[in-house]
Amino acid sequence: MLKIRRRPTRNNPVEGVVDGLEGSALRGWAWVPDVPDEAPLHVEVRSGDRVWGTAEAHLFRPDLAQAEKRGGYCGFVATLGPMPPAGTELTITAVTPDGMSHGLQGSPLTIPALPHGMADRPGNTDVLPIPISTTDLCGSLDQCGPARIRGWAYWLAPANRPLSLSLHESGREILRLDTNQWRGDLAELRQGDGCCGFEAALPPELCDGELHTLDLRRSDTGATVLARPFTMRVLGPGIGSAQHSPGPAPLSRTPVTQKVTLSVIVNFYNMRREAERTLTSLSQRYQEDAQDFDYEVLCIDNGSNPPLDPAWIASFGPQFRLLRPSRQLASPCAAINEAALQARGDYLAIMIDGAHLLTPGVFRAARQTWTQHADAVVAVRHWFVGGDQRWLAVAGYSQHMEDRLFERIQWPNNGYELFRISAPIGEGPEPWLEGLSESNCLMLPTSLYDRIGGMDEAFDQAGGGFANLDLWHRASENARGPLVSLVGEASFHQFHGGTTTNVEDTEKDVRVRSYANAYRALRGKEFNGVPPSRLQFHGSLRSEFATGIRQRSLIPLRLGITGQIRPGQLPVHFDDGAQTYLQSVYAECGLQESVTWMGEPAGVAPADLMSLQEIIHQLRPDAIIAVGAEAGLIGFIDSTLCAMRSEGSRMLCVNPVSLPAMPMSRLTVLHEQADDMHTLATVRHWTGSAESVLVLYDVMRSETLSLASLQAYGALVSYRSYLVCLGTLFGQPWLGYSNRDPLQIVREFARNSTFVIDRSWNRQLISTCPFGYLRKIGGTVNAIHYDPALDEIPSAPSLRENA
Amino acid sequence: MNRFWHRYIRPLIDVVQPNRLLEIGADSGWNTRNILEYCQNKGAFADIVDPAPKPSLHDVLRQFGTEHYRYHPLKSVAVIPQLDTPDIALIDGDHNWATVYSELNLLHARAEMAGLAPPIVISHDVAWPYARRDMYYNPDDLEASQKHPYAYRGMLPGVNELVEQGMNGVLANALHEGGPRNGVLTAIEDYMASAGIEFHFRKLPFFNGLGIMVPAARMTPELRRLIDSFFTAESLLDACVAIETDSMHLRAILAQTETCLSRRTQALERARDVIETLSRRIAELERQPLH
């Protein structure tokens, strides 16, 4: 008979839970909190003397990592074989190295009787992620469907050999997966070296909506790496519901005799002003090298009031003619298809929004592309005249002001001057090289347009919703040639009352989301743009202003529109990569070394001084312990406390290096190594019964920084106060080369403590302590858990006796 | 959310008679117990989702057969696309716009795939403090563009900025209240505005707020009558009594805390006297000549 202890007690060191039984897999977790570095626990599943399954509690699970259970490495999956009969009561125990068995929470567990037909329920598929675990492998199968399979796995012991997995169904290998992709999230979680991800497209045979039982195995030995096979039902495109359509039916065209190379179809609705510039930009006198180019421009007037004049349209050249659609609909899709069927070109250029005008080399670049690849699809990126038109609209920008911008560049004399007065859509750092969701001048073979059914008229929202994005997406999926994104040529959106471009952010937000939902309802999947890896980039930069918004100041012209400042979005304008780069430059140049307070070096960035001042102001600490801090920083803190008239606050400076004499009555200096046992005892004694304790720890200058040292000083920090790790910033060359990595120790400390990394103090961009502000948020005591025994203060005589 | 069970959630479930339920954010399992009791009695099934529950959830789960539930120790946005569409979803997970908006859209998309109407959604925290302010259990889980500037500081009613002495200061709260893409209620409103189908939405504005969102396709006259009955004078009077009772309990806890604080203060004062006495005695001894 086993001796079972259900809950961790003083004599039962095991903490663990049985999560439940899924099929024949019994899942849970177990560890010994007091000895976290001990070998993984052995788990046994028994009924009476019979052992139904065993497992080692060493599997990694992100939820356990988050809950600070053995760094996440204490999950287990015990496969029961054979499956015990229904009604069997299973006892699940963890065995400690001393041979003692300890019952886990959730044990005993009774094998349920499955209701009739339960095993065949449509929803009875496995929910991922599923752990990958063998004696020498660790990993996770994170995703299987709708289009891709994804996960990670690596050798537990260092091994200089690749790891390849294979997906099997009914014993047959259907997909091979190399686990060699680098993933930032894995590197962050320290799964191997981060180069252990795998991802591949699922074979179409699995995407049939049927239930599949699959197994993941090692390719070299064929050994399974999962606790048991898993079942999945993968719905491929168009499967799952009859209401989801992959796209419209192909268009049927009457052959024409007088063919041209290109038919431009441009759609107008109540934009006479914008149409003039757009049509000018499509004219033979504006487009370079277009004198011998055979093309036509079909101008749709989709119900404008007043209507566009055909004579005015024709005045732009013999290529131009006006079309009025046979049906007046809010969505322009049907009108564009109707125009497309009248087009004579071998290629079509679809411009769904007639407010876009072009640079002068668009036709030439497209022709050059088609000379090399006749089946190429050519996409032109779009910019905004004037910059962020949504904000400008709110600020008071007007069409009249936009006209002044055009006058300023003397448009159309040099069409590339448009880049001077415009900004690319989005605020990314590489406007020409990013993925593409949409083009407002999409040029494609007419045969392709017909084959994919042209614009999908099911997009019936005003303006067409995601119809244009959908056209680009379907063209990219069905193209027989390359997808070419032009560089240095663009379309430029003029300011008008468009459906999404000239409305306030909040309204646009709602409208775009409704378009996205309509797309999903129609296609049965979320819309995804075309990633840069699928694009070819053709062209050259004809204007120095075309390089991107960060390399220049926009619009060298004062329009005097507003006194407002555009509300910025830091992650959009200045992403993590940009901040890391900026901070790296700061650290490599050692600029923090020149930050001084009253002539003494402070050793941190000015923004950190302000952050520390604010923290001290908020906390009003009784005791501040500064480990390894520079003299200037000590002086700064003293000045802050003086300014707050915080006479009672004390400060302890622990530094093995002698600092300049600092005549401060509140300061005690300890010239010792911070992690020395006697030093720690002295610091604890000095801290005494201070209620609000703040610790500053210079982790960069500390020669002896360790996890234990941070834990010791962290224990002194009071609830809701901070342990500020100074100097966590390092320069770019340090990455991977340095033998010191304080940030890694800081993160490890934070993962296994009552502290959180409070990144809100790093918003001033340049900090020498990124990820270094650790706030203590755990360890609260409430009235219910109050220990009145702590109120029993020994009297003076008894203290004397103890002494 | 547990405080809404008997008076509001249970009647809703009784009228709707769901075959499948989804609970996002089980925490201690108080509400989970109620849900699983219903499942056990009616033969229904529940998906319970919580990546970091309190240990007591497992005590609750083990009291019920696994034929009635499946527990997913994962984030909701990872799990929802893999689950069958529930008839009712109870949402009390990560209280921020990005997460709630994603949850609602994922539920919607999943229902669409199955040719079903989206589920009835009962969501907590649609009143102060998180109706119009984001909170992030783990800010690093979200992309930078999905979160507002935040701090581990507390909140006070009617105060836009965070304050050190406010409520929930141990959580990462958005620095400011209101504005676009901020808060649970905003997420629900934005979802309804863009979903392209009709909803009936009502909000009980106490106990942090309970939102009841019913797609028109799932509304019945009986369900409408029930929801309307939550807002009659008599029902709201009952709610006042419940709020008052809750307030009295809180006052009792406050009194208990004040007692503890008073005792601790008195103890510290005694300790200070002890220390001063000993200090004087040490000083006297140090003044005495050594023999």
Image (cartoon, coloured by chain):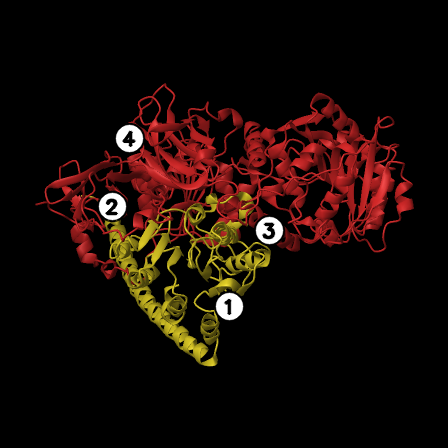
Which amino acid, mark 3?
A: Ala
Q: Position of residue A276 (x, y in %)?
A: 86, 44
Q: Given contact means CB atoms under 8 Å apart, are the residues at marks 3 and 4 in contact?
A: no
Query: Sequence order check: which comes first, mark 3 or mark 4?
Result: 4
Q: Can you identify the residue that label 4 sits on? A: A134
Which amino acid, mark 4?
A: Thr
Note whether residue A598 is visible.
Answer: no
* Chain that is yellow in the image: B
| Marks 3 & 4 on one chain | yes
Q: Can you identify the residue that label 2 sits on? A: A16
The residue drawn where x is 36% and y is 53% is B47
Q: Secondary structure at mark 3?
A: helix
Query: Sequence order check: which comes first, mark 2 or mark 3?
Result: 2
| Marks 3 & 1 on one chain | no
Mark 1, residues whose alpha carbon is within 10 Å: few (<14), some, or many (≥20)?
A: some
Considering depth in this image, is A795 or A277 the residue closer to the camera? A277
Q: Is residue A300 left or right of residue B196?
A: right
Q: Quadrant of the N terminus of chain B?
A: bottom left
Q: Position of residue A93 (x, y in %)?
A: 18, 43
Q: Given contact means CB atoms under 8 Å apart, are the residues at marks 3 and 1 in contact?
A: no
Say which chain tag 1 marks. Answer: B
